[in-house]
Amino acid sequence: MKGRSVRLTVMSLLLTTVAIAGMQMAFECNRCGLTEAFSTGGGFRFQQMTCFCTNCSHIVSVTWKRGDAVPKPVTYQLTHQGAVPIYQCPRCFKDTARQWGQKLCPKCGSTNTVVKGTGEIYD
Ligand SMILES: [Zn+2]
Ligand SMILES: [Zn+2]
């Protein structure tokens, strides 16, 4: 690998790409009151997966370069819905970011949730 300069370039590309492609969403759980903003969709140069970190209690995006293989989960957590992949949280860097399907509340499991666009929608 070429190391640091490559990573920095990728980071700045990610930041600019998030602003032009992808959708800013707001999640709200009517049961436990969790409210989080998150982005969905990929960009020209990257793809992302929405996860919920059980350590810092935030919805986070695990991103990778478009064209690269989907990152391998650190581990799997067995739930009643099957094995859910766990990734490293980009926010607190703990291996506690659980893949999230954007439907059930990732905190309490309630279906009484609202997901809506915040008006910042790009295509
Ligand atoms: Zn909830
Ligand atoms: Zn975290």
Image (cartoon, grey):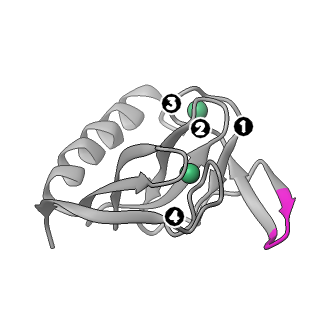
Front disc: 2 or 4: 2
Quarter occupied by the C terminus? bottom left
* Residue type (three-letter) at the residue carrying disc 3: Arg
CA gap between label 2 and label 4 equals: 19 Å
Image point (61%, 28%), residue name? 93
Please provide the residue range marked out in magenta: 77-82
Beta carbon at label 2 within 8 Å of ligand 2: yes
* Residue type (three-letter) at the residue carrying disc 1: Asp
Q: Which residue is mark 3?
A: 91
Image point (45%, 63%), residue name? 113
Return the x and y of residue 27 as percentages of the image width and height: 38, 55
Beta carbon at label 3 within 8 Å of ligand 2: yes
Q: Which residue is mark 1?
A: 95
SS type, badge 3: loop
Return the x and y of residue 10 as percentages of the image width and height: 34, 43
Q: Which residue is mark 4?
A: 68
Return the x and y of residue 78 as percentages of the image width and height: 87, 61
Image point (23%, 64%), residue name? 117
Query: Compared with residue 58, is residue 17 higher up or lower down, i.e. above or below?
Result: below
CA gap between label 4 and label 3 equals: 22 Å
* Residue type (three-letter) at the residue carrying disc 4: Asp
Return the x and y of residue 2 as percentages of the image width and height: 48, 36
